[in-house]
């Protein structure tokens, strides 16, 4: 029996595209990706050349190198597509991402590879290896590998088309910054440091962009409803009209793939290998969310309306562009909490230090900053240590830059494989700060987002020591992926933890406990309404992929769903579907956020609430969930950690916490 050819499973030395010049030169990037694709080809050829009895050692070993090289190339093409400073490099990165995806879809339809994997004897294999093979074979069948050759060729064309459309859709959002002009008067209500950063031009007017740090404060603080409306429309049309046609084509292409494969809809296909299992199950879940949030959201709306009418007698409705503003006003009054008041306690650098320290204690690791080259000088790099052993590396690219992706995300950089590669991952965010002299004062929900993304990062690093690349880090079912992130978000609730890093950037004063309580009360208010916003997004994501795309009128669809789930007045001209970036990654499965929230809150409830970092929950969680990566089904990990399936209880309590803690009486009493 031939032994695996050593050359094809060699560890590649050149694991960073930017070290090969790929962050600055399109040509260098193409060369680096080509080398990865060549390594993937070599492993593929070695796999197919094996003669005699197939075993994981002589077959899966090669297959996993194929997966590893594709994910290495795909991850870094993806990262550079989001962060490279030069547009020509970003364009190249998009093309490279497409090339890698093409290789991936060719692999998913490669009948000889499927036959080879299916022929392996799994006797005596570890449960993780068995799970890997079974899941891979299921993926093959869902891709259509058992169809005739013409059908497979057709499917591959369709998949490539879907990938290209998805990449274009994402890039248009990323590049589609708009700006609006505001008068100085219209900026009334915005914080001083915002005003300082936005000086009027020679004509006395101020230019604002649709980037998060410009947009979000306007929607929260600006007294001028005209300004909020202009900002809202600019923000939600920043990739319109281009993305409308692209989305329509993408939906049609996905539906065609589903039809060829014998599925009623894309949503049924996309949930078939997920924890959810089917579009019908997703609808049952949505119905449950709807019921759990309806009453609370109605009360929240009534309270905001009553309050707004007292401020502005005669006010008959609050529209979609004023919701955030009135929430802020209400919170100031009812909870004596001005979200601006905590910002001086959250300067970016301190928050970073605090979150890193929290994660280090919780997961019993150490982070050491290292001075190595990344794709941009603004990126800071940390090594992760366990004792004296280095177990991973991460990159923090945390502030806006020209041409950089405008969102907040965690991305794999190097998929970790035990004995081969240490895991590496990156955060690509757009938090305030980053400019000399700017302390980067964060809103508290920015801090929550930071915790969230750091949860993903830890999953990639701590889960990046599996035997197989195909089981590493994020390789869980797609609808389990938001559990670790949303679990870590909850740590923001802890007073002791917050006080360990929230200090006034000028006076050094620690964030007072009374202020934290008001902040928590204020932030809990609106959860039910916020959940209905999620139901709106979730239903949209599902509906768009669960009917004949030809019959979809995107503008009518978003308006109808919004008015079905939310009480705030709709604004025509809103084209949010054109910049709903999750429609590419999650497609029909945006339910993932809410579904995983239920699991994450149940997980969080297992921690000692009086001493979150103490007790054994952190260690158990790390072992049962994070370290597993995709070695087990999500369902098994839930049961391993909880000892049962997740329950709705913790989620319902969280959703209605405001009415327990501050209660309706708290609207007045919360001041004390
Ligand atoms: Zn996330």
Image: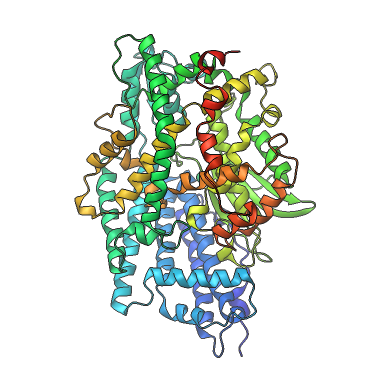
272 up-or-down from 566: above or below: below
Relative vertical location of residue 98 with respect to residue 486 in this rendering, above or below: below
Q: Residue 460 placed where, x, y %?
A: 60, 53
Judge from the rendering whether residue 247 lies leftward or rightward of residue 201; answer left or right: left
> Which residue is situated farthest in the left direction here?
551
Q: Is residue 114 above or below residue 538?
A: below
Task: Using the rendered image of the protein, determine whether residue 629 is visible from the camera's viewpoint.
Answer: yes
The answer, for residue 441, to whether it is visible in the render is: no
For the residue pair 211 and 408, the one nearer the viewer reads as 408
Residue 161 position by quadrant:
bottom left
Query: Left of 252 or right of it: where is 615?
Result: right
Q: Residue at x 45, y 63 (%)?
A: 273
Where 324 sits versus 134, above or below? Answer: above
Callout count: 0
Q: Which quadrant of the view contains residue 606? A: top right
Q: Position of residue 267 (x, y in %)?
A: 35, 56
Residue 232 point in image, percent of width and height: 34, 28
Q: Quadrant of the C terminus?
A: top right
Colour mode? rainbow
- Point 40% across, 39% down: residue: 291
- Which of 665 and 280 lies nearest the eye of the viewer? 665
Quadrant of the rendering where the N terminus is positioned: bottom right
Q: Is residue 536 left or right of residue 444?
A: left
Q: Residue at x 24, y 48 (%)?
A: 245
Question: Residue 117 location, x and y as percent?
Answer: 51, 78
């Amino acid at each position: 029996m031939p032994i695996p050819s050593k050359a094809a499973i060699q560890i590649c030395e050149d694991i960073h595209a930017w070290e090969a010049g790929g962050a600055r030169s399109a040509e260098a990037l193409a060369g680096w990706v080509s080398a990865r694709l060549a390594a993937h080809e070599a492993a593929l050829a070695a796999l197919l050349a094996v003669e005699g009895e197939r075993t994981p050692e002589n077959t899966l070993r090669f297959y996993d190198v194929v997966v590893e090289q594709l994910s290495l190339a795909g991850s870094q093409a993806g990262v550079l597509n989001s962060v490279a400073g030069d547009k020509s490099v970003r364009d190249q990165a998009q093309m490279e991402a497409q090339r890698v995806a093409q290789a991936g879809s060719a692999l998913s339809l490669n009948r000889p590879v499927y036959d080879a994997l299916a022929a392996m004897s799994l006797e005596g294999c570890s449960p993780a290896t068995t799970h890997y093979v079974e899941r891979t074979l299921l993926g093959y069948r869902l891709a259509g590998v058992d169809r005739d050759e013409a059908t497979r060729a057709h499917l591959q064309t369709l998949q490539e088309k879907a990938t290209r459309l998805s990449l274009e859709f994402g890039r248009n959002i990323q590049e589609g910054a708009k700006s609006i002009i505001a008068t100085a008067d219209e900026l009334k209500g915005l914080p001083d440091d915002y005003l300082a950063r936005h000086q009027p031009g020679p004509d006395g007017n101020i230019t604002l962009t649709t980037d998060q740090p410009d947009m979000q404060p306007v929607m929260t603080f600006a007294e001028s409803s005209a300004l909020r409306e202009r900002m809202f429309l600019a923000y939600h049309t920043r990739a319109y009209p281009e993305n409308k046609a692209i989305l329509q084509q993408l939906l049609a292409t996905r539906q065609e793939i589903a039809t060829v494969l014998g599925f009623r809809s894309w949503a049924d296909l996309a949930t078939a290998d997920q924890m959810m299992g089917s579009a019908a199950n997703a609808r049952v879940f949505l119905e449950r969310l709807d019921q759990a949030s309806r009453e609370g959201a109605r009360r929240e709306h009534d309270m905001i309306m009553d309050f707004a009418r007292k401020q502005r007698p005669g006010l008959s409705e609050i529209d979609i562009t004023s919701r955030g503003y009135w929430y802020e006003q209400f919170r100031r009054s009812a909870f004596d909490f001005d979200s601006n008041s905590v910002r001086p306690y959250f300067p970016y650098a301190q928050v970073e230090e605090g979150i890193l320290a929290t994660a280090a204690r919780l997961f019993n690791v150490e982070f050491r900053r290292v001075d190595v080259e990344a794709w941009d000088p603004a990126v800071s790099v940390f090594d992760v240590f366990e004792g004296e052993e280095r177990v991973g590396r991460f990159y923090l690219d945390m502030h806006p830059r020209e041409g950089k992706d405008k969102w907040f995300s965690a991305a794999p950089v190097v998929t970790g494989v035990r004995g081969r590669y240490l895991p590496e991952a990156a955060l690509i965010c757009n938090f305030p700060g980053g400019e000399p002299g700017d302390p980067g004062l964060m809103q508290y929900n920015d801090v929550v987002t930071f915790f969230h993304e750091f949860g993903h990062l830890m999953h990639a690093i701590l889960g990046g020591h599996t035997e197989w690349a195909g089981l590493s880090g994020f390789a869980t079912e797609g609808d389990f992926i938001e559990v670790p992130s949303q679990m870590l978000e909850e740590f923001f609730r802890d007073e002791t933890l917050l006080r360990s890093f929230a200090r006034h950037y000028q006076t050094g004063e620690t964030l007072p406990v009374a202020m934290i309580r008001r902040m928590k009360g204020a932030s809990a208010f609106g959860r039910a309404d916020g959940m209905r916003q999620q139901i709106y997004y979730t239903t949209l994501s599902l509906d768009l992929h669960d009917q004949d795309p030809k019959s979809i009128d995107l503008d009518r669809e978003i308006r109808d769903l919004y008015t079905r789930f939310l009480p705030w007045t709709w604004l025509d001209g809103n084209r949010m579907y054109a910049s709903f970036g999750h429609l590419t990654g999650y497609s029909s499965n945006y339910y993932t956020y809410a579904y995983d929230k239920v699991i994450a809150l149940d997980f969080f409830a297992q921690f000692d609430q009086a001493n979150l970092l103490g007790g054994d929950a952190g260690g158990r969680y790390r072992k049962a969930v994070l370290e597993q990566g995709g070695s087990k089904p999500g369902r098994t990990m839930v049961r391993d950690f909880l000892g049962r399936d997740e329950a709705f209880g913790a989620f319902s309590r969280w959703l209605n916490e405001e009415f327990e803690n501050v209660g309706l009486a708290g609207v007045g009493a919360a001041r004390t």
